[in-house]
Amino acid sequence: MEATMEKIAAMMHAQLESDRANQERRARERIEAELSHIKREQREIREAQKEAAELLAQHPKDMQPKEQEGWLYRFERWAARRPVQALVVAVAAVALAAYLTSRAIEILTKWARVQFGIGQLEEENRRLSAHVIDVQAKLKSERVVRPSKETMRHIHQHMLD
């Protein structure tokens, strides 16, 4: 009888340990997935910043007509992949067609940088970086509750009674 109770207690203890390990694994997987998602978003933001800076650094006024068409095509593709208003693309196309002066292009470039949200992208990147730090701290501090030795003794004693 006592051997049976010990076996039952051992099985319950093993099940509790297994449950705890599963809880820890699921929590770790959930947090790792969230970190992965955040890092992917940060990478996309950096890529968008780089693409926008490269496109906006070029001066279409100084290009040949074929080069301007290529620039406009790349600009339109970039705008289609990003949440940019169609009006901004239209304004850029009109600016290219009108051969604005170098100063006007600089003003348009500054306006476009604000419009395209490079500052917003940088802010989002900072926000996501802070979130990564918060999630990492959460991962370090998250603990799965398991029964104390006293509780286990009580369960074992209750089974013996």
Image (cartoon, rainbow, N blue to C red):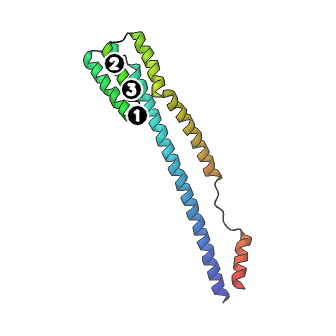
Residue beneath disc 1: 82
Horizontal relation, residue 95 to residue 113: left or right: left
The residue at 51%/43% (across/down) is 38
Q: Which of disc 1 and disc 3 is earlier in sequence? A: 1
Q: CA distance from mark 3 to mark 1?
A: 13 Å
User: x, y percentage for residue 11?
Assistant: 60, 77
Q: CA distance from mark 1 to mark 2?
A: 20 Å
SS at circle 1: loop
Which sits earlier in the primary sequence, circle 2 or circle 3? 3
86 sits to left or right of 136:
left
Residue labelled with disc 3: 87
Report the residue that reaches farthest toward the bottom.
Answer: 1
Query: For the point 43% across and 29% down, which residue is it?
Result: 50
Q: Secondary structure at mark 2?
A: helix
Closer to the observer: label 1 or label 2? 2
Gap in angstroms between the C-alphas marked 2 and 3 = 10 Å
Does 67 sit left or right of 15 as displayed? left
Q: Crowdedness of circle 1 by 10 Å Cα count: few (<14), some, many (20+)?
A: few
Q: Which residue is mark 2?
A: 94
**Residue 91 in the image: above or below residue 151:** above
Earlier-in-chain disc, 1 versus 2: 1
Examine the image and state in which quarter residue 68 appears: top left
